[in-house]
Image (cartoon, rainbow, N blue to C red):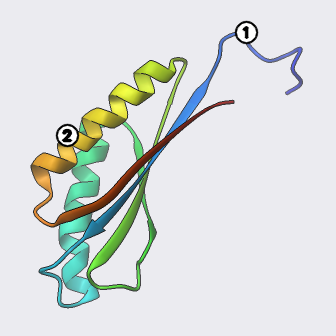
Amino acid sequence: MSKQQRPSGETYVGVAHLELHVPEARSLKAKRGPVRSLVEKIRNRHQVLVIEADHQDLQQRSRLAICALSTSSVDIEARLRRVEGTVDRNWSGHVLSWEIEIVQI
């Protein structure tokens, strides 16, 4: 779609990268349960896309990418902060890092 055909409204994409430590996991199978549970809670409560973006081969680490779209960067920031609160309340392991990037497309 050319710029002339594009709608006049702005669109923003927000991506949060979340690095998790799963100290109780002694195998990849043991890691999957708690990570999958957290991913489902985030998806169901916040209407965002969530994928395990890295560390699939490490038994005690997981890196999630969480994506949100909106016409407002303020809305995306607030939504991703609510996701952060959900993680804090529901994750029994350690949150090693949390980074948010918002871009206009």
Name the residue located 56 percent from the left edge and 34 percent from the top edge: 13
Q: Which mark is residue 92?
A: none
Name the residue located 34 percent from the left edge and 26 percent from the top edge: 78
Q: Residue 54 in the image: state x and y as whole percent.
A: 46, 71
State the separation of the CA atoms marked 2 and 1. Answer: 33 Å
- Disc 2 to disc 1: CB gap under 8 Å: no
- Numbered disc total: 2
Report which residue position mark 2 lands on. 85
Q: Is residue 24 above or below residue 45?
A: below
- Mark 1 Cα-neighbour bin, 10 Å: few <14, some 14–19, many ≥20: few
**Is disc 1 placed on a helix, strand or loop?**
loop
Residue situated furthest top in the rendering? 8
Mark in front: 2 vs 1: 2
Q: Name the residue type under label 2.
A: Gly
| Residue closer to the observer: 39 or 12 | 12
Which quarter of the image is occupied by the C terminus? top right
N-terminal label among 2 and 1? 1
Q: Residue 96 in the image: state x and y as whole percent.
A: 29, 63
- Mark 2 Cα-neighbour bin, 10 Å: few <14, some 14–19, many ≥20: few
| Residue closer to the observer: 78 or 1 | 78
Q: Residue 98 in the image: state x and y as whole percent.
A: 36, 52
**Is disc 2 placed on a helix, strand or loop?**
helix
Q: Residue 16 in the image: state x and y as whole percent.
A: 43, 47
Q: Quadrant of residue 100?
A: top left
Which quarter of the image is occupied by the N terminus? top right
Residue situated furthest bottom in the rendering? 27
Q: Is residue 95 above or below residue 86?
A: below
Q: Is residue 96 above or below residue 26?
A: above
Report which residue position mark 1 lands on. 8
Q: Name the residue type under label 1.
A: Ser
